[in-house]
Image: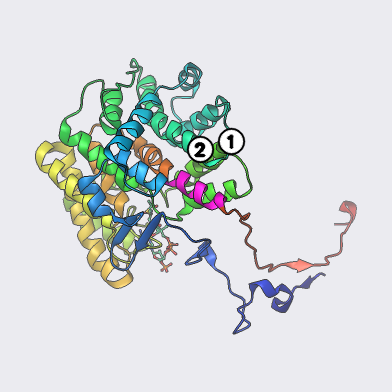
Amino acid sequence: MGRKISPEEQSWCLDKVTGKVVISKGLENICIDKSTICYIDGFHSKLYYRGYSIEDLAKNSTYEETVYLILYGKLPTRRELNDFSGWMREERDIPREVIELLAKIPRDIEPMEMLRTAVSYLGNLDPGRHDMSLEGVIRKTIRLISKMPTIIAYWYRIRDGKEIVCPDPRLNHAENFLYMMHGGKPEQILARAMDVSFILYAEHEMNASAFTAVVIASTLSDYYSAIVGAIGALRGPLHGYANVEAMKQFDEIGSPENVDKWYREYILTGRKRVMGAGHRVYKTYDPRAKIFREYAREFAERYGGKVKTYYQIADRLEEYVMKQLCETRNICTNCDFWSGIVYYAMGIPVDLYCAVFAAARTVGWSAHVIEYVTENRILRPRLYYDGEIDREYIPIENR
Ligand code: ACO
């Protein structure tokens, strides 16, 4: 028999005042650093990047400008923006070796698994991969955010047996992505919605994937490892993959008339969670969901068909969530509830939605890596040991 360790022997886990063991399961409300990148007021539906509200940015900015803002902390002048957008355009092509890799990757893997592999390989091909200076990380960030849409579009076309469509430097970031996906210049309203979706997904404070990136960077590992780790964290259905799961959930419900039955059968019984609802920080409506929702409504009216059916199912389900979960338990719909319907209207296959999210979020991950390592301290929390110590080792033949 061993012996249990007492709480007093693990003083780092005790509250200084009460002397009781404190466990922050899920690191809820733990501040790991100061930051000037992003502020979320989860009680008043507010989100700011570098002090600018998400509503202002979604209305007036572009992804290119928002990337500049997030990375450099200020809005660019016209000249700075032109130079910066030009830099992003120049970085869109991907090396031949990566195209060959995409052709070899099994067709049936998830796009996030493909993206993880392709980003890692891009790192292998970058001679400056170990340069963690500010300029070095910014250069790699521009490299990645410009190339990730190309990787996703090429992958989509390769797996569908279509010719790839090379980037068009005359188009902006969002237009070019849709152009590479579909092989034609997109409708302006769809291109603008894609641009806004990139803005909405660009950054969101110390979420699980940003934290993963920062943990990796805090060991003084390299930038590509940090981003590959973040892609892995985003892929989970509790995080970024919720936009894919929300669409599967709408498919499972099938029609607006089935929402009531489905809700009673699965949500009221606790057998399932509403995908695209609930948030660790937002205890009221996610401000990004409001913007995505408005695009989804507009596209449902404009395009009808399955876009409209998805919208009607989501609209009905949201009514239940808002009345039964949001009002009573602060579990409200989040951005991933609505974004998929917007992407669906653009003709993007459902399984790619989380990868599109990752392409946008890479800027936020990178900004946090830069900010954290500037005054670095390795991230190293503790666990409360609840097992035994000093157990007698018994030779295998005697067990
Ligand atoms: N549907 C139904 N019940 C829910 C939901 C939901 N979507 N979310 C939380 N709850 C319930 C839980 O069952 C739990 O109930 P209990 O106390 O009776 O056991 C309670 O609310 C607290 O849930 P936690 O998982 O502890 O909350 P946490 O803050 O840890 O998790 C999370 C947040 C992961 C986002 C959660 O709300 C969830 O699973 N949502 C669905 C997935 C989703 O939409 N993820 C996207 C988040 S946004 C993003 O990452 C981009």
Placement of 93 over or under 240, stated as above or below = above
Placement of 2 over or under 92, stated as above or below = below
Tell me which amino acid carries mark 1.
Asp
Give me the C-alpha separation between circle 2 and circle 1: 9 Å
Q: Which residue is mark 2?
A: 135
Residue at 37% of width from left, 30% of height from top?
88
Residue at 81% of width from left, 69% of height from top?
2
Q: Is residue 299 left or right of residue 86?
A: left
Q: Is residue 78 left or right of residue 366?
A: left
Nearer the observer, 329 or 359: 359
Marker disc for residue 389: none
Q: Secondary structure at mark 1?
A: loop
Highlighted magenta segment, given as a residue range: 364-374
Residue at 20% of width from left, 44% of height from top?
310
Q: Which residue is mark 1?
A: 131
Tell me which amino acid carries mark 2.
Glu
Q: Are marks 2 and 1 in contact (CB under 8 Å)?
A: yes
Q: Is residue 241 visible?
A: no
Q: Is residue 395 left or right of residue 107?
A: right
Q: How is the image coloured?
A: rainbow
Q: Nearer the viewer, mark 2 or mark 1?
A: 2
**Which image quarter has ligand 1?**
bottom left
Q: Quadrant of residue 174?
A: top left
Placement of 5 over or under 83, stated as above or below = below
Q: Specify the quadrant that holds the N terminus.
A: bottom right
